Amino acid sequence: TVGIFIIRVFIYFVLGALLAQIPFWEATYASRAALFSELSLTELCQSATLLSAALLMAYKAATDDEFRQLAVCMALVFAALFIRENDQTIEMVAPHGTWKYIVLLPVLPCLVYYFKNRSLVSEQLLRFMQLPSFGILLSGLSVLMFSRLFGRTTFWNAVMGDRFVIIAKKAAEEGVELMALGLLLAAMVEFAFFARSRR
């Protein structure tokens, strides 16, 4: 209905505004030395979105027979992304490169589980692709890819030249990445609580 459409538009506008405020709050209140560091507000919010998405998919796997196998794989993928997002934090207390071994904890079970259930996962993925949450997920992944390219140092050197300021680059890159991860989380919320396929 039109009412539901308006509510959804409002919720997504509020989400976008809130995500834009987080880097602003950090720039306003955090110390200059800690801006957009690994333990900054923006980075912690990025980690929180990935962890929340993983937990939502674990919940989906436990409660929804229709998408169980797909949800298990997605939960493990988001868990791997969460570990990757915190690679530098892990290396503050562990040897360099340790995260590459820790990330295998979700990656290897995901691969084994997928190959044992690949026909069900493929079938469920096809149904998922017909849902609105898939479009939101795809948008989030596209923005995530954009953030990686947008944050290239070569690009910001070309823009700023001799007036290159690394904190400006980090603010832009991390802000766009936060928006991307916010969209991924929104997709998982929709998938976890509102997705019902039309078989």
Image: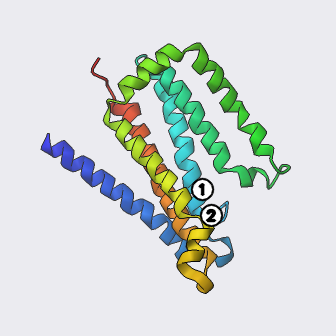
Residue positioned 54% across, 25% down in the render: 72
- What is the C-alpha distance between the residues marked 2 and 1? 6 Å
Residue furthest to the bottom in view is 162
Residue positioned 13% across, 44% down in the render: 2
Q: Quadrant of the N terminus?
A: top left
Count residues near mark 2 (Cα–Cα under 10 Å), then give few for <14, some for 14-19, many for 20+.
some
- The residue identified by callout 1 is 44
* Image x and y of residue 121, in percent: 49, 20
* Image x and y of residue 167, in percent: 61, 75
- The residue identified by callout 2 is 40
The colour scheme used to paint the residues is rainbow
Residue 157 lies, with reference to residue 137, above or below; the image says below
Closer to us: 152 or 32? 152
Dot 2 lies on which element? loop
What label sits on residue 115 in the rendered view? none
* Image x and y of residue 146, in percent: 49, 56
Residue 131 lies, with reference to residue 100, above or below; the image says above
- Say whether marks 2 and 1 touch (CB < 8 Å): yes
Dot 1 lies on which element? helix
Closer to us: 85 or 30? 85
Q: Amino acid at mark 1?
A: Leu
